[in-house]
Amino acid sequence: MVYAFDKQDASRVYRWPHVLPDEKTILVSSSSEVADSDSILLLYDKENGTSQELITNAFNGRFVEETGHIVFVRDSSLWAVPFELDNLQIAGNEKRVIEDIQTNGILGSAAYSFSKNGRLVYLQGTDVAVATADLDMNVVSRSGDLIETIDISGRIGQLAISPDNSQLSYTAYKNSQSDIWVWNFDREVAGRRTFDGTSNRARWSPDAATLLFNNVSTTQNLRGIWTVRSDGSAQAFEVYRDPSNFDSYQLQSLSVTDNRLIFFSRALQIGQAALWSLDLSNYENVEMDIKQLKVSPNTEPVWWARAATSRDGRLISYVSNESGSNQIYIRPYPDTDLGKWQISAIDAVSPIWSGSSDEIFFRSGNSFFKVEYEEVSSESKTFLNLSEPEFLFEHTIVENHLTFPAYVYNPATDNFIILSTSDNDSLQFSDSAYSDQTTLTVVENWFTELSTLVPKSTSN
């Protein structure tokens, strides 16, 4: 039994626990959302609930009992350091022992393992995650033609186009921090809008005058929903926080008719994640109206739901895996119990309302589709006539929890803006990125090599 682990810093992510031979100490990786940005190795005492920092800039650590070393990952390499189990202290210097191991800098995972008889097996490769990669913003036509690449690159994600179609907000990452930036299509310039904390997942107000975003900072005690003027003319301020009920706010969209912000939260209890809508009519009201959106009553909602209302505010689209795979559904809004329509037939994500026509766009992998819809009203109900999904084009897209949403539709120009890789031959993020790195290396008698390469300090 692990005692009081839920008392640890809730703003951190804890991964890859490894129980030491004393059976009471756990070696665990602790980081913010991106593991390779600020991950540290902690020693956690499961009997009294205390923890101590052991190694910085490290993740996926394990103890080698046969040699008395802790091995861990840093910069797609395996490192080792001598460790005294009796007093739980480092007993030497850190040293790189294996280079070029496949890692995932987002999750902090690494493809290596060793047996008790000294055999090491690892997968050669590099970091396959987007956390350390530069991406491009490609403007693509309905037929899939590349029109241009917007003059923004780097570690970027989470696109949102303004309601007047004149600007594009995005998240820019730097080390463990992130900020909201805005690109002006006419002037072709980008401006930074946030400066405190880790800001992400911006969404536009219906009048395009403000941006709502998630803000997190453990050092500055920031964790809530904030707003800032979209032109940068005023400082950002917090509009909502409820730490007693929510541990995260993953903003989805703003309803155009009732000024409600739709967001996803993991909540504080496992199995209680949900979609919520927050009334933004009065920022100064500390008892702001918040309601749960029960669009998936038979399953737990997902953070990639991309829930959004139609241009007239009468319908809401979202993604649910209630059928066993990701599918796109539409319900009436705000009375979601009055109907339900599935518009996709294959594994599908990221629905977007056209904004200028009765169309919804979505994708499956790198394939992009559209569905046309028509509202038919009777005296008591509204029905939808839906077309079959129509294939539009294929284009490489990098969409994960750091970049999502990784594409938007601009109705003013009738094209798409998609986050993609600069060089598809050398940098990929789909399943092929993993399949290209399939060289397993086996090292026999590795414990002997480890003891020679990383000896304990003579002072110990």
Image (cartoon, rainbow, N blue to C red):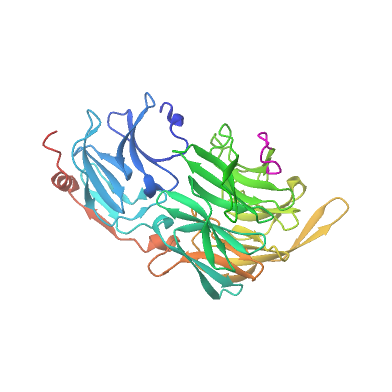
Q: Which of 148 and 298 lies nearest the eye of the viewer?
A: 148
Q: Identify the residue at the far left of this view.
A: 458
Q: Is residue 439 toward the left or the right of residue 283 in the image?
A: left
Residue stretch rendered in magenta on the structure: 279-288
Instruction: Tell whether position 283 is magenta.
Output: yes
Q: Where is residue 82 in the image (x, y as percent from the top left)?
A: 20, 39
Q: Position of residue 424 (x, y in %)?
A: 42, 69
Residue 401 visible in this rendered orientation of the protein? no
Q: Identify the residue at the far right of this view.
A: 379
Q: Identify the residue at the far top of this view.
A: 48
User: What quarter of the picture does the N terminus occupy?
Assistant: top left
User: What quarter of the picture does the C terminus occupy?
Assistant: top left
Q: Where is residue 127 in the image (x, y as percent from the top left)?
A: 36, 57
Residue 204 position by quadrant: bottom right
Residue 405 visible in this rendered orientation of the protein? yes
Instruction: Tell whether position 211 is magenta.
Output: no
Q: Is residue 316 toward the left or the right of residue 68 in the image?
A: right
Q: Name the residue: 13% across, 46% down.
A: 452
